[in-house]
Amino acid sequence: MENIKEHFEIIAKDYDYWKNKNKYYYIQLKHILKERIPPAKKVLEIGCGTGDLLIALEPSYGLGVDISENMILLAKKKHHFKNIEFKVSSAEHLKSKEKFDVIFLADVIEHLENVDQMSEALNSIATKDTLILITMINPLWELLLLLMEKFNLKMPEGPHKRLTFQELKEIFNKHNLNMICLDYRTLFPKNIPYLSGFVNNHFYKIPLLRNLGLIQILTLKKL
């Protein structure tokens, strides 16, 4: 856990730089979440970084938590809303008396030391009406992303492990979290005018291509 925390404490100062460098990807990520999360909901983001995704969702109340104290300090400096809070917490030890309409993790689950423990924490916070969304990188893209990182084209990933859909499903089932569906989005994570938008808006409707999408979206509900 400490190695993961240390990585994000160090990278916090450059976090927004990397997001801007890969702006199109993060625009896609916001679009994916906004498609599924209407405004004016009570939203918890686990692994909120500097808070931009949570703010983009326009929640009636939003809580963003992150393991990195530096990330939370930056989030508080950037965003000043009475209905938004940012707190330091690991996903595995998260506790809250608040009940949320939506809980989401974006590009976080691969960095967790103990997904089983995080699932147990999710179960304790979620109600049967809570929508749980998890976005993560498709493991098929791992080699390409490592190459991009080597050539300074993407944010340094740090310690991570990309679990398969089946591995995650077994963990979630153990904690009474039902996997409703698995979706894929974003075949072109870089903006090629006209082409990227067209392909990204349609490829996932084609059975032979959909599993190649960069972003996997898991939708869960508590049993």
Image (tube, rainbow, N blue to C red):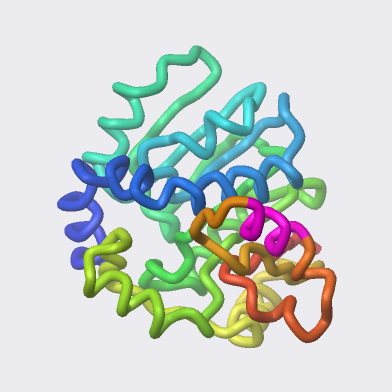
Q: Residue at x 24, y 41 (%)?
A: 69
Q: Kindly indicate the quadrant of the structure image that contains residue 83.
A: top right
Task: Kindly tell me whether residue 21 is visible in this rendering.
Answer: yes
Between 2 and 27, the one lying in front of the other is: 27
Q: Residue at x 63, y 81 (%)?
A: 165
Between 49 and 115, the one lying in front of the other is: 49
As drawn, 139 above or below 70: below
The residue stretch that appears in magenta: 194-201
Instruction: Tally the numbered discs.
Output: 0
Q: Residue at x 31, y 49 (%)?
A: 18
Task: Kindly tell me whether residue 179 is visible in this rendering.
Answer: no
As drawn, 101 above or below 219: above
Between 172 and 201, the one lying in front of the other is: 201
As drawn, 121 above or below 39: below
Q: Is residue 114 left or right of residue 174?
A: left
Answer whether residue 67 is magenta in the image. Answer: no
Answer whether residue 195 is magenta in the image. Answer: yes
Q: Residue at x 55, y 76 (%)?
A: 138
As drawn, 205 above or below 71: below
What is the x, y in percent for residue 196? Answer: 62, 58
Q: Kindly indicate the quadrant of the structure image that contains residue 197.
A: bottom right
- Image quadrant containing the C terminus: bottom right
Q: Is residue 178 left or right of residue 94?
A: right
What is the x, y in percent for residue 102? Answer: 68, 43
What is the x, y in percent for residue 168? Answer: 60, 79
What is the x, y in percent for residue 183? Answer: 74, 68
- Image quadrant containing the N terminus: bottom left
Q: Main secondary structure of the magenta part?
A: helix
Q: Is residue 124 left or right of residue 22?
A: right
